[in-house]
Image (cartoon, rainbow, N blue to C red):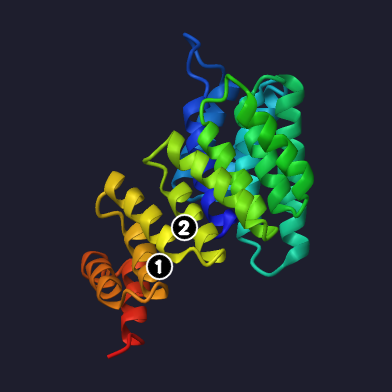
Amino acid sequence: MKLTRVVTAMLALALCAAAPGARAQSTDAELVFNTGLTHLREGRLDMALESFRKAISQDPKNPYFYKGLGIALTQAANRCGEDQKCRMSRLEEAIAASRKALEINPYYTDARNDLGTTLVLAGRHEEGKKELLAAYEDAMNPTPEMSARNLGQAYFEEKNYQQAQSWASTAANRNKLYIDAHLLLADALVAQNKLEDAVLALEVGLKANPNNPALMLALGQACFKAGRFADARGYLEQVAGRDPTGPFGRKAAELLQSFPR
């Protein structure tokens, strides 16, 4: 599973949890920021970027605003497609926004998570891993499983599958409801040709998250690779039946078409 696809959702989730709201009265800048959050959640990326930048211009000392801008810029980078110049430009802006959030509040662990993740996306793996490890080891980190999972993804992309397995396992054990940790763990095991272990890891994940289509699809694929064709067909048929028009169901149906008779 691509880091770019997963991370955006995770960062947005962390942002929502960290959004300012503790004050009795919101400032004008906070109202603009919250408007940006709404645009971001509802897919109006350009409007979200405009709102976050406006909030920063009104209050340049609020780290939450820079976090929001960094997340929106990371999403903008994902939309650049094959245009690497566009992608890297957005990612460098996102890195700068996360660094600014940390400059204002060095204890803002969510921003350190974002920084590490975006550095990895930009291909700066060693810097990114350093930041993610620092975030993971921070006792105040509200989502250490995200730091662990993204560390694992960085190692996976480097083809260091043992370290990827270790960090993905850590993430999955810390939060059994964390779908992407189970998926990464299975990917790392498959990459080491530990096919039965991958099946077992996905079964554990599916038990904790019943009927999740991403896990069920991955389990069908792992069973197929392990030569357990009957089990594979069963899982893929379930996904295709439950999610006929969604991405997981369509992928399962496609795999079933090439299934051995």
Against 63, is 23 above or below?
above
Instruction: Please name the residue that numbered disc 2 is placed on.
Output: 186
Against 85, is 134 above or below?
above
Answer yes or no: is residue 65 visible.
no
Q: Residue furthest bottom?
A: 261
Q: Could you say which is closer to the camera, residue 217 or residue 250?
A: 217
Amino acid at pointer 1: Ala
Q: Could you say which is closer to the camera, residue 239 or residue 122?
A: 239
Q: Is residue 14 left or right of residue 136?
A: left
Answer yes or no: is residue 243 visible.
yes
Q: Any mark on residue 222, and which?
A: 1
Image point (27%, 75%), residue name: 233
Label 1: state its secondary structure.
helix
Label 2: state its secondary structure.
helix
> Quadrant of the image for the C terminus?
bottom left
Image point (35%, 63%), residue name: 219
Q: Could you say which is closer to the camera, residue 30 or residue 185?
A: 185
Against 168, is 234 above or below?
below
Q: How many numbered circles are shown?
A: 2
Find residue 30 and report its horizontal and vertical position in percent: 56, 23
Against 239, is 168 above or below?
above
Q: Are marks 2 and 1 in contact (CB under 8 Å)?
A: yes
> Quick one: label 1, few (<14), some, or many (20+) residues within 10 Å?
many
Find residue 47 and report its horizontal and vertical position in percent: 57, 45
Q: Mark 2 or 1 closer to N-term?
A: 2
Q: Any mark on residue 165, and which?
A: none
Q: Is residue 218 left or right of residue 143?
A: left
Image point (65%, 44%), residue name: 117
Amino acid at pointer 2: Ala
Q: Could you say which is closer to the camera, residue 89 or residue 199?
A: 199
Find residue 133 and report its horizontal and vertical position in percent: 67, 34
